Amino acid sequence: MERYGKAKRGWLKSFLALPHGIPSHDTFNRVFQALDPAELEGNFLNWVGAIAERTQGEVVAIDGKSLRGTAGSDGKPIVHMVSAWASANNLVLGQRKTDAKSNEITAIPELLRVLELSGTTVTIDAMGCQKNIASQIVCQNGDYILAVKENQPKLLADVKDSFQMMAADSVDEQIDCGHGRVETRRCSVLADLSLIDNTQNWPSLRAVVRIQATRFHKAAGKQEHETRYYITSLQPEAKRLNAAIRQHGGIENKLHWVLDVTFGEDQSRKRAGNTAQNFSLLNRIALNLIRNDKSAKGSIRGKRLQAAWDDNFLWQLLLGEKS
């Protein structure tokens, strides 16, 4: 940051006084350690709310990501971030820090509380399949699709039994091709919850869902099979549910993967104070700025380079218009 500041001093002086020049890298480090992440995240939420065009039924995916570069002597990451991803907007809506992946259960409600969920569909992996989380989403006028796995053994067994004993009310099949593979996803939905115990504990529960996925890898000539189960407050419409569950994968492909590969987030060794959390938010701000740019096609990596080289393009990203 210090070297970039010195290289861009002329551009920075167009809106900063800089009476003592560009701060040293140690100063940058101390500042980002000391900045209050809650204040930064609050301003981030206000900004995202201004640029996001929320659509009815938009999928908001919630998922966690460990910052591997913050690993301590035991090899376990110190910082784990839970993010909310707007699938239609391709934007990060917010984030919360946890001290370990197991604490996602407490971080998810905190993140949900600061989001506008009215009219959205919230998708969460098995860690978030909790009655209080389902209740909170419904109270905030949203709908939910929650993955059911071994952390809810009784519920998982009841869902599996339901599909073994009864015929699906609605079925949808989608086929995707790309990256050297063909994937078929068959979505089956049951509205009959008679085999599910204590359904009253799951607010607005309307259906259970089964996804049977088959992936054929062309190069290897191999086929993989996977079956996943969900509960939902949405109406038992297989086509809509199949599409929404598919969109949940965007948080891995369009957020976590990009942060690792393009922004090098996992390689960062920042860990002191609030540095890792604050820098993770900076990465998400940069990603949102680039994804919000519709002036020209190009990769995220390419647009980052262009912003470094071209001051006009940098202004365009920051302000949404050319300087």
Image: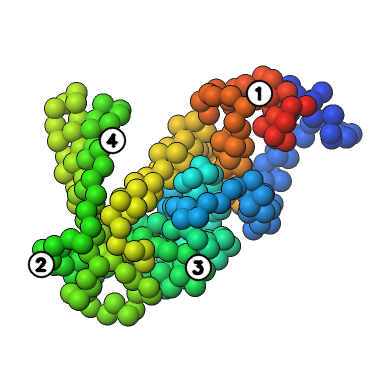
Q: Residues within 10 Å of mark 2 (few under 14, many from 20)?
A: few
- Judging by the rendered image, the residue that carries numbered circle 2 is 165
> Which quadrant of the figure contains the C terminus?
top right
Report whether residue 280 is seen.
no
Q: Percent x, y for residue 303?
A: 58, 25
Residue type highlighted by circle 1: Ala
Q: At x 61% / y 32%, what residue is drawn?
A: 293
Residue type highlighted by circle 2: Met
Residue type highlighted by circle 3: Asn
Q: Percent x, y for residue 17?
A: 88, 35
- Judging by the rendered image, the residue that carries numbered circle 1 is 308
Q: Vertical placement of 7 versus 112: above or below?
A: above
- Judging by the rendered image, the residue that carries numbered circle 3 is 141
Decide which of tag 3 and tag 1 comes sooner along the chain. Answer: 3
Q: Vertical placement of 143 versus 274: above or below?
A: below
Dot label at residue 176: 4
Q: At x 20% / y 37%, what residue is drawn?
A: 215
Mark 4 vs mark 1: give the one in front: 4
Decide which of tag 2 and tag 1 comes sooner along the chain. Answer: 2
Q: Residues within 10 Å of mark 4 (few under 14, many from 20)?
A: few
Judged from the image, the secondary structure of the residue bearing numbered disc 1 is helix
Mark 2 vs mark 1: give the one in front: 2
Q: Residues within 10 Å of mark 1 (few under 14, many from 20)?
A: some
Q: Is residue 206 left or right of residue 197?
A: right
